[in-house]
Amino acid sequence: MKQKYLLPLLLSFATFFHQSAFSQMHTLSGTVKSAADGETIFGAYMLLVNAANADDTRYTTTNSAGFYTFSSLPGTYILQINMMGFKVIN
């Protein structure tokens, strides 16, 4: 059985930045699709961990269109995408 891969960086993985007068906050959003056939991935588990503070961990799942978003992000984060039947992407 061929293993499927998620390629969020290649397929509609986008980062948008918002700057305020007091601090720099970021929003991370995008669409998760299968690299094998381009189908959107519904219900993928998205884990976001602050690189400097592992206690600052956030999670969400992709919606029916494969879309996800994380808001109000200070600093640097590590994103992990999990979905049964697919290889985990960091």
Image: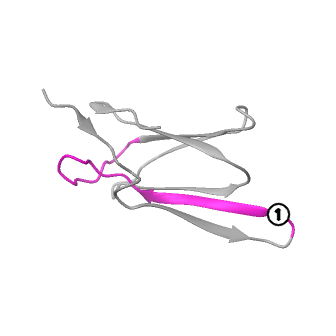
Q: Is residue 23 above or below residue 68?
A: below
Q: Is residue 66 found left or right of 78 in the rendered image?
A: left
Q: In the image, which residues are magenta?
A: 22-44
Q: Is residue 63 left or right of residue 86?
A: right
Residue at 22% in and 53% down: 39
Q: Is residue 47 magenta?
A: no
What element does badge 1 sit on? loop
Left or right for 28, reference 19: left
Query: Measuring 74% from the left and 38% from the top, which residue is drawn there?
Result: 52
Question: Number of callouts in the render?
Answer: 1
The one nearer the camera, 2 or 84, is 2
Quarter of the rendering occupied by the N terminus: top left
Identified at 76% across, 63% down, the residue is: 24
39 in relation to 2, above or below: below
Position in image of residue 41 (x %, y %)? 31, 48
The percent position of residue 7, horizontal first and vertical second, equals: 34, 48
Residue 26 or residue 84, whichever sits in front = 26
Q: Main secondary structure of the magenta part?
A: loop
Q: Nearer the viewer, residue 71 or 2?
A: 2
Q: Residue furthest front?
A: 10
Q: Residue at (19%, 46%) from the top-left corner?
A: 36
- The answer to whether residue 24 is magenta is yes
The colouring scheme, among rainbow, by chain, secondary structure or one colour, is one colour
The residue that label 1 is drawn on is 23
